[in-house]
Image (tube, grey):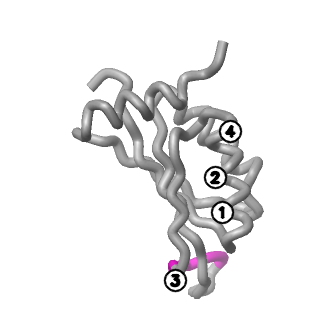
Amino acid sequence: MAGAILLCLATCPDAACAERIATALVEERLAACVNIVPGLHSVYRWQGAVEHAGEVLLLIKTTRARYPALQARLPQLHPHELPELVAVESNDGLPAYLRWVADMTRPVE
């Protein structure tokens, strides 16, 4: 599919951070939609220790074309030294929804 749609996963330390980042990404047209999923519990290794943390998951819908700008912007908005950002390309979806994602992330001229 030309103009592939990406589902990007990112985590935030709390709901306020998640809301702030989600709003900025949509306002800046780097994402068409961001779902905020509270109640995540993460276990990960960081600086030699196993950590446990409550987090909030962001499900960010964007396009392959807008991903480089999203990848550059997220660290500017995020409080962590190394924010999580993983992108998964969509193989299929409702065509009208995929067009909407592309339209909502197209930069305004």
User: What residue did someone put label 4 on?
Assistant: 27
Q: Kindly identify which numbered label has been placed on residue 18.
A: 1
- Distance between the alpha carbons at the discs numbered 3 and 1: 15 Å
For the residues marked 3 and 4, what is the alpha-carbon distance in whole angstroms?
Answer: 28 Å
Q: Is residue 62 left or right of residue 92?
A: right
Question: For the view shown, which residue lies furthest in the front direction?
Answer: 96
Report whether 64 appears left or right of 95: right
Question: Are the two marked residues, 3 and 1, in contact with CB atoms closer than 8 angstroms?
Answer: no
Q: Position of residue 71 (x, y in %)?
A: 60, 42
Q: Quadrant of the N terminus?
A: top left
The residue shown at (59%, 76%) is 55
Using residue 4 as the reference point, say whether residue 20 is left or right of it: right
Dots 1 and 2: beta carbons under 8 Å?
A: yes
Q: Residues within 10 Å of mark 3 (few under 14, many from 20)?
A: few
Distance CA(mark 1)–CA(mark 4): 14 Å
Query: Which residue type does callout 1 highlight?
Result: Ala
SS of the residue under disc 3:
strand
Describe residue 79's horizontal placement relative to residue 50 as left or right: right
Q: Quadrant of residue 84?
A: bottom right
Determine crowd level at label 2: few under 14, some 14-19, many 20+ residues with C-alpha closer than 10 A.
many
Q: Mark 3 or mark 1: which is in front? A: 1
Task: Identify residue for label 2.
Answer: 22
Q: Earlier in the sequence, mark 2 or mark 4?
A: 2
Q: For marks 2 and 4, give the CA distance.
A: 9 Å
Residue 70: which numbered mark, if any? Answer: none
Q: Where 60 sits versus 80, above or below?
A: above
Which residue is at a point 66% across and 62% down the rendered structure image?
18
Label 2: which secondary element:
helix
* Residue 41 numbered mark, or none: 3
Q: Which label lies toward us, 1 or 4?
A: 4
The part of the chain drawn in magenta is: 40-47
Q: CA distance from mark 1 to mark 2?
A: 6 Å
